[in-house]
Amino acid sequence: MKRAAGHHLLLEICAWLLGILMMLPIYIMIVNSFKGRREIFTNTFGLPESWSFEFYAKAMEKMNFLTAFKNSLIVTVVSIGLIIILSSMTSWMLVRMNNKLANFILLVFVATMLIPFQSVMIPLMQYMSSWDIPAIGFSMVNTHYGLVFMYIGFGLSMSVFLYHGFIKGVPIALEEAAMIEGCGKWKTFWKIVFPMLVPITMTVGILNLLWIWNDYLLPSLTLSSPTLRTIPLSTFFFFGEFTIQWNLAMAGLVVSIVPVIIFYLFAQKYIIKGVMAGAVK
């Protein structure tokens, strides 16, 4: 009994230490966002001498925060919405087809999760650049819809994998009953199946939100116009070649992660439930 209690106490101590270690970068970022350059280097881990929001105001002005926030919001919401619609419908059809072709298509989706983005980014940008049609102003580069198109392509594989595992647990008898009542496939999916996918839909939304909202690499390759920059691109310009505005950069980073934290706190209860249901079945 004492041995079990000792193991429990040891695990609890390890959990606390791991939690503190994980939260340490966020603490450093927040306290240093209120400090000047001198104080950051002389008192990196301590609390600031004053809690002035002066650097937040300067950072938001230099970032052109409202424009960057609007750009990030448009790209993120549209990308996640289309990823959820396309991946849920694709997964449902693959589960209900349940033949060799469906299994092969699922394996293709899963296999693409193993391909690192860095290995395809140069040919991807060369290919997307070739889609320019100047006569009608169509371009897949330096446009938000081109960036959304690429996010959909990279986000479908993991989303289809999670939806596929979850939908296997949805009773087919409900769909058969709806079809007997006169529902077609389209109506059966939206009226019967999709409402039962709320936990995994929230999980897919959160995971893609964390990735797309914070992504720097793909927007840096795609967007060159200052008016199209997302928040990660805007914060990068605090890091110059010869000087780094640490206090403004810290303030900008804090402002950029606030929307993600709020959404995460609102929907975090669905993450473990959805991932477990989607990955284990």
Image (cartoon, helix red, strand yellow):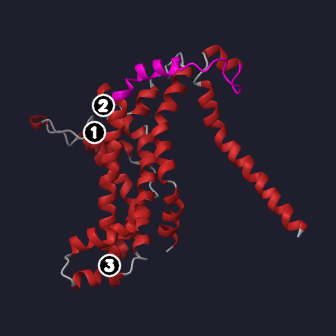
Q: CA distance from mark 3 to mark 2?
A: 41 Å
Q: Which mark, residue 96? A: 3
Total numbered badges shown on the rendered structure: 3
Q: The magenta stretch spans which residues?
A: 43-67
Furthest-top residue in view? 38
Q: Residue 27, percent across and down?
A: 64, 34
Residue type highlighted by circle 1 = His
What kind of element bears circle 2? helix
Q: From the viewer's perspective, is 92 left or right of 255?
A: left
Residues packed near mark 2 inside 10 Å, few (<14), some (14 to 19) or many (20 plus): many
Which residue is at a point 37% across and 37% down the rendered structure image? Answer: 219
Q: CA distance from mark 3 to mark 1?
A: 35 Å
Q: Which residue is mark 1?
A: 144
Query: Which of the two discs, 3 and 2, labels the residue nearer the N terminus?
Result: 3
Q: Is residue 273 above or below residue 226?
A: below
Q: Which residue is mark 2?
A: 228
Q: From the viewer's perspective, is 201 left or right of 280?
A: left
Whether pointer 2 and pointer 1 mark residues with C-beta atoms closer than 8 Å, the reply is yes
What kind of element bears circle 1? helix
Residue 112 visible in the picture = no
